């Protein structure tokens, strides 16, 4: 049997079948080019991908679908040359559709030669791989962000160690001074002031860290009230004046209008002011100028903090409010912070409906931070009193429970100096025994107590049927939201975190006096919980 040689009719039928097959492929653009790169055929998939029909494209050079950059670099012609030389080339690049949009094309081009090896043209197959390309780009972006975050984390941990160790040296030196000259009043005062400054500095660092964590997880609730921004600005001005004096800064406060009412959380606005002023102080050389300017501009209350300090590089400006961002990580940076203060400011301003902006003309040319908060109407001022306006001569019976003897004794001395009767216990069992014997107005409880912990002591006190149960103040070094929830469940009214400012505790006692005895006033107890 002899095989029949296909005739012209068979070839035509096969070609028709191939064309039908190619036209039916809609997920791929498949077309033929002549040896010069002009389009000879165009399937339906190519029409869907590029947006041009066959009549519009046939006879045109394929380079028309290249990006301007690709065409200027001669990539379409280079692809033809490489395919002619090697037989087949695979490439991926951006292509342009008829409407001007781009897609990431994954292409294979094959050289077509006759039986003598003469180049007749090219066959090209392209598919849209934009989704895959965008996924790759997103993964690269995320990988870069993770790498940057990891680098900033390492820098942050190094600086955290540095910033926390630095205050320990003067504290240790002060202890040595107190031991060597316990009867010299001037030296005792000098050492005491030094310890207080360093402890406050460390407490601020730790508070900032905890606040960033709470804000990141949405755990901080604002407690807005009607407050006067000019009063808050004056208070912040006085708070940082010693630091400015120590650094020999020219420090100026300008208040353009009184009052400037806000419906805001005063504790959080204080944090915003203090962080911005401390930031200005840290990055301004001795003898430099720092200005705090507050005003009302139309419907906004505006805070401006200006300095003529080190300024901010233009490359850093877009990232200045990101967590752990630091302008300088060199060893001689002189305590430039942990890179969390400005991030904390932004996170505190936003929930108030405000904005913060930064401007700097570059290194060595200072900076200006502008905070805008919605101003409140001039009417309906709150008649509530502040802590310091609550004055009373009444005495309280206070129990201080802490296994740290120095902590308990020092607090008892402070409270006695303010006219309160104070007793001390150093473990939970002893505290419960003392409480069974006589009533107390306020009980300050450490959490980590021997024998019976502070949570259990609080629960037992709360189970008592006395009409006038004491105000329970839990004091601990654990300040996460879960710790606060445990304290609330145990029955604590207030939960400040160590080290607690004695003035804050005295404010609590004054509030207790003003509350006339029984129970706690709930609202202010919660307020104090977030103060620490």
Image (cartoon, rainbow, N blue to C red):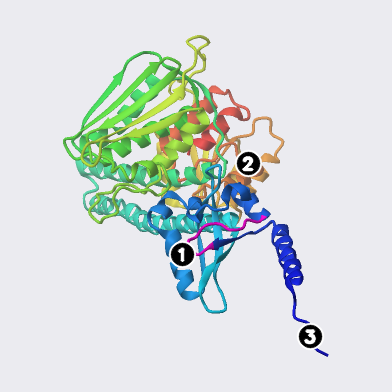
Find residue 174 and report its horizontal and vertical position in percent.
26, 50
Q: Which residue appears at 64% of the width and 34% of the height?
A: 469
Find residue 133 and report its horizontal and vertical position in percent.
54, 57
Q: Is residue 115 visible?
A: yes
Determine whether, in the image, residue 163 is placed left or right of residue 459.
Answer: left
Q: Which residue is mark 1?
A: 79
Q: Quadrant of residue 134?
A: bottom right
Above or below for 154 versus 370: below
Q: Which residue is mark 2?
A: 488
Find residue 15 and report its horizontal and vertical position in percent.
71, 66
Real-space Cα separation, disc 1 to disc 2, in angstroms = 71 Å
Quadrant location of the N terminus? Answer: bottom right
Element class at badge 1: helix
Residues rendered magenta in the picture: 34-43
Residues marked 1 and 3 touching at CB (< 8 Å): no
Point out the tag, 3 or 2, that comes first from the N-terminus: 3
User: Looking at the magenta stretch, what is its main secondary structure?
Assistant: loop
Real-space Cα separation, disc 1 to disc 3, in angstroms = 42 Å
Point out the tag, 1 or 2, that comes first from the N-terminus: 1
Residue closest to the far right? 1
Q: Which residue is mark 3?
A: 3
Residue closest to the far top? 379
Q: Which residue occupies the foreground of this view, 305 or 191?
A: 305
Quick check: is 137 in the magenta stretch?
Answer: no
Element class at badge 2: helix
């Amino acid at each position: 049997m002899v095989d029949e040689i296909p005739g012209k009719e068979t070839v035509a039928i096969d070609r028709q079948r191939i064309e039908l097959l190619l036209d039916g492929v809609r997920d791929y653009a498949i077309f033929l080019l002549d040896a010069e790169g002009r389009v000879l055929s165009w399937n339906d998939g190519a029409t869907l991908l590029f947006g041009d029909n066959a009549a519009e494209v046939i006879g045109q050079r394929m380079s028309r679908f290249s990006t301007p950059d690709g065409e200027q670099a001669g990539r379409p012609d280079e692809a033809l040359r490489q395919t002619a030389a090697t037989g087949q080339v695979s490439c991926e690049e951006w292509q342009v559709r008829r409407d001007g949009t781009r897609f990431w094309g994954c292409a294979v081009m094959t050289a077509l030669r006759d039986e003598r090896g003469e180049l007749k043209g090219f066959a090209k197959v392209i598919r849209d791989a934009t989704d895959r390309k965008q996924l790759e780009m997103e993964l690269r972006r995320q990988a870069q962000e993770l790498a940057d975050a990891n680098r900033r984390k390492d820098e942050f941990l190094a600086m955290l160690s540095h910033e926390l160790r630095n205050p320990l040296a003067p504290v240790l030196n002060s202890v040595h001074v107190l031991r060597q000259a316990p009867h010299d009043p001037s030296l005792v005062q000098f050492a005491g002031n030094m310890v207080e400054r360093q402890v406050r500095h460390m407490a601020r660092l730790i508070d900032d860290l905890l606040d960033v964590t709470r804000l990141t997880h949405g755990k901080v609730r604002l407690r807005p009230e009607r407050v006067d921004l000019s009063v808050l600005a004056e208070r912040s001005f006085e708070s940082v004046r010693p630091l400015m004096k120590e650094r020999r800064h020219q420090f100026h406060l300008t208040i353009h209008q009184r009052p400037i009412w806000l419906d805001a959380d005063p504790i959080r606005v204080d944090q915003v002011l203090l962080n911005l002023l401390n930031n200005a102080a840290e990055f301004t050389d001795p003898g430099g100028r720092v200005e705090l300017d507050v005003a009302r501009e139309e419907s906004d209350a505006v805070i401006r903090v200006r300095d003529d300090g080190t300024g901010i590089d233009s490359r850093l400006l877009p990232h200045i409010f990101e967590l752990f961002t630091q302008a300088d990580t060199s060893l001689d940076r002189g305590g430039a912070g942990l890179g969390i203060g400005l991030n904390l400011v932004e996170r505190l301003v936003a929930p108030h409906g405000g904005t913060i902006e930064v401007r700097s003309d570059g290194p060595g040319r200072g900076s200006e931070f502008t905070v805008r908060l919605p101003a409140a109407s001039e009417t309906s001022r709150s008649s509530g009193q502040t802590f310091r306006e609550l004055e009373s001569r009444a005495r309280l019976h206070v129990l201080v429970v802490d296994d740290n003897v120095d902590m308990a004794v020092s607090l008892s001395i402070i409270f006695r100096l303010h006219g309160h009767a104070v007793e001390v216990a150093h473990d939970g069992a002893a505290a419960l025994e003392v409480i069974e014997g006589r009533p107390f107005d306020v009980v300050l409880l450490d959490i980590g107590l021997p024998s019976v912990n502070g949570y259990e002591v609080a629960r037992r006190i709360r189970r008592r049927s006395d009409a006038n149960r004491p105000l329970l103040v839990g004091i601990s070094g654990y300040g996460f939201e879960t710790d606060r929830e445990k304290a609330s469940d145990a029955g604590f009214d207030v939960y400040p975190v160590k080290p607690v400012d004695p003035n804050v505790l005295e404010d609590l006692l004054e509030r207790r006096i003003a509350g006339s005895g029984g129970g706690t006033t709930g609202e202010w107890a919660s307020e104090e919980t977030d103060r620490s």
